Image (cartoon, rainbow, N blue to C red):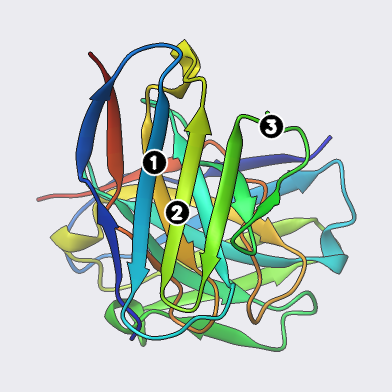
Amino acid sequence: DIQMTQSPSSLSASVGDRVTITCRASQSISNYLNWYRQKPGKAPELLIYAASSLQSGVPSRFSGSGSGTDFTLTIRGLQLEDFATYYCQQSYNIPQKFGQGTKVEIK
Amino acid sequence: QVQLVESGGGVVQPGRSLRLSCAASGFTFSNYAMHWVRQAPGKGLEWVAVISYDGRNKYYTDSVKGRFTISRDNSKNTLYLQMITVRAADTAMYYCATSITMLRGVPGDWGQGTLVTVSS
């Protein structure tokens, strides 16, 4: 199985900050990397698919980059609704695996 | 507007069975592959299973193989997860999600989940 490792596990930030979360795959997954945001008590929401494609309806402050094994999610201008947990996920093969999550907290 | 509504969760004793359902509306259900993803309380997301648009192909994570069965009824726009011989480790919120393709498909739209608690 391909393992997904996110860093950091948590971070503190302020409204308006730029935040970067990284995700590393244990082997190359090309660009089959997706990012989700999960607000407390809610279902995950797809933000980015195929490493850098913005899901319809997702604000442009979210962006993704990377290929192969190393990927990045960047949030420019953090908003209150962005204080949540973020997960990367590989859809390259079965079983699809998620990273362990990154919790973004208010500083 | 895509809507996915899971149901069937509850408290179940270890070793017993449970069937989850996911009712779909707002899109052409029979055109989409479907996933189950679960989340244990306070933990991260775990992909469980996927089924092709026509129900012919299915894949599972190792920990549920032989115990869980994913299926669908396209005439009823409903996805199922039959769970047998459940264990405490199966305690989780179970989400269904759509994807355009099965292999390399991206779980795009998600339901709100149904909670399964395995406890004696």
Near mark 2 (Cα within 10 A), the count class, few <14, some 14-19 or many ≥20, is many
Near mark 1 (Cα within 10 A), the count class, few <14, some 14-19 or many ≥20, is some
Kind of residue sitting beneath label 2 = Thr
Residue A46, position as x, y percentages in the image: 59, 45
Residue A27, position as x, y percentages in the image: 37, 86
Is residue B7 left or right of B114 when viewed as pictured? Answer: right
Q: Identify which residue, B64 or B44, lies in the foreground.
A: B44
Kind of residue sitting beneath label 1 = Thr
Is residue A95 left or right of A1 when viewed as pictured? Answer: right
Is residue B85 visible to us here? yes
Q: Residue at x 50, y 81 (%)?
A: A29
Up/down of B50 relative to B28, above or below: below
Residue carrying label 2: A72
Residue carrying label 3: A60
| Helix, strand or loop at mark 2 | strand
Up/down of B35 relative to A87, above or below: below
Q: Residue at x 74, y 74 (%)?
A: B101
Residue A43, position as x, y percentages in the image: 49, 37
Q: Identify which residue, B110 or A29, lies in the foreground.
A: A29
